[in-house]
């Protein structure tokens, strides 16, 4: 026999969706790629660790500006200041049935004028597995920023 309180619990469980998703442990690297006229590409110590994600790029010098491991909480924005006026915004949206993590990634460029909202320059969804993912094309004075992600 099902009681009224039992029915209420079942209804709440059905409409509330899946239980809370555990936070995602995410490693990321912010690497600046530039052309310095080297015959052999140069990777600094931390960039060497993600060389496989950089080798096909047209730069000959790779310097790591930031490397960090962080925990992304489900459905909460995490803001990460990058070089110059760039800010990375990450939002963990849960996992796919095959285990890949869904992460919305947005890169904003702060306006030069005060009281002007930032401009969204990249907006994408990443499906992260054991392989690395990258975002590039963020111009700087000396080259481009390359963002690399791994779980």
Image (cartoon, rainbow, N blue to C red):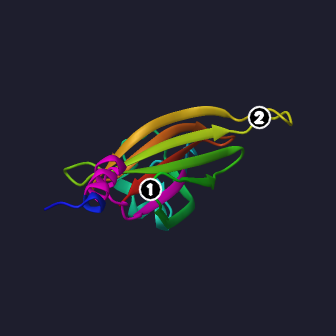
The disc placed on residue 1 is none
Percent across and percent down for residue 77 are 55, 51
Dot 2 lies on which element? loop
Percent across and percent down for residue 60 are 49, 47
Which residue is situated farthest in the left direction here?
A: 1
Query: Which of pointers 2 and 1 lies earlier in the amino acid sequence?
Result: 1
Which residue is situated farthest in the right direction here?
A: 114
Q: Give the number of callouts.
A: 2
Label 1 sits on residue: 74
Can see residue 112?
A: yes
Name the residue at 50% across, 63% down. Answer: 44
Magenta region, residue range: 7-31
Mark 1 packing: few (<14 Cα in 10 Å), some, or many (20+)? some
* Foreground residue among 110 and 115: 115
* Foreground residue among 45 and 7: 7
Closer to the camera: disc 2 or disc 1? 1
Label 2 sits on residue: 111
Q: Are marks 2 and 1 in contact (CB under 8 Å)?
A: no
Q: Is residue 75 above or below residue 73?
A: above
Q: Is 29 within the magenta?
A: yes
Quadrant occupied by the N terminus: bottom left
């Amino acid at each position: 026999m099902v009681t009224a309180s039992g029915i209420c619990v079942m209804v709440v469980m059905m409409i509330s969706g899946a239980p809370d998703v555990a936070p995602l442990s995410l490693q990321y690297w912010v690497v600046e790629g530039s052309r310095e006229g080297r015959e052999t590409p140069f990777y600094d110590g931390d960039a060497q660790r993600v060389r496989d994600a950089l080798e096909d790029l047209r730069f000959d010098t790779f310097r790591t500006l930031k490397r960090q491991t962080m925990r992304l909480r489900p459905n909460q924005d995490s803001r990460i200041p990058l070089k110059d006026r760039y800010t990375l915004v990450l939002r963990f949206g849960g996992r796919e049935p095959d285990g890949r993590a869904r992460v919305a990634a947005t890169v904003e460029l702060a306006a030069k004028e005060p009281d002007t909202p930032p401009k969204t320059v990249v907006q994408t969804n990443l499906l992260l597995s054991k392989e690395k993912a990258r975002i590039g094309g963020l111009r700087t004075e000396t080259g481009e920023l390359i963002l690399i992600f791994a779980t």
